[in-house]
Image (cartoon, rainbow, N blue to C red):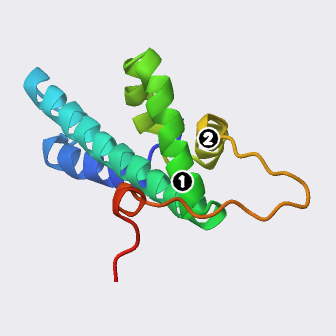
Amino acid sequence: MKIAPAAVSKFEAALKPKLTADGKALLSPQEVVDLFAAQARDANTLWQEQIVAQDKAWEEESKARFSETQLKAAETGVGFLSSFDPQFRDLAKQFKNHPAFVNAMRVVGERLSEDTFEIAGAAPAPAKRDRAQVMYGKRN
């Protein structure tokens, strides 16, 4: 297993003052635990930074690949599937920006949208009017 150079140098720096003339390290059990804890903390911090960087890269890729409407459809898909199992929303948070996940949720969200009927040769349907226009007509 290859160890990161920064971790090796930090470990060697911590051991150097504890070495005897014949090259043996005189460490107490607590010092060994403290060194291990510091190494684990550093590794966890690095891991968290990698997760954040990967998520940001996925987010940029998804925003470049999908339109705003498609991204909203993906949110609709997540909401719909979360209504069956609330734990799905927690799962979705882990993959929320991955392009493959966004695409799958987009498909679900688009399938949930209202259908429109188009008759060949007919004029397109007029734009929807709000309730005030329907009840009171157009005001000038």
Residue ID at (56%, 58%) = 69
x, y percent for residue 3:
45, 43
Q: Which residue does the numbered mark 2 point to in the structure image?
A: 114
Residue that lies at the very extreme toward the bottom in this rendered image: 140
Identified by mark 2, the residue type is Glu
Identified by mark 1, the residue type is Leu
* Image marks 1 and 2: residues in contact by CB distance under 8 Å: no
Q: Quadrant of residue 31?
A: top left
Residue ID at (32%, 54%) = 9
**Residue 21 appears in view:** yes
Q: Is residue 12 above or below residue 34?
A: below
x, y percent for residue 6:
36, 55
Residue ID at (23%, 40%) = 41
- Residue sitting nearer the eye, 13 or 36: 36
Residue that lies at the very extreme toward the right in this rendered image: 120
Element assignment for label 2 = loop
Q: Report whether 100 appears left or right of 33.
A: right
Q: Residues within 10 Å of mark 2 (few under 14, many from 20)?
A: few
x, y percent for residue 91:
44, 28
In this view, the mark in front (1 or 2): 2
- Residue sitting nearer the eye, 5 or 92: 92
Q: Which residue does the numbered mark 1 point to in the structure image?
A: 71
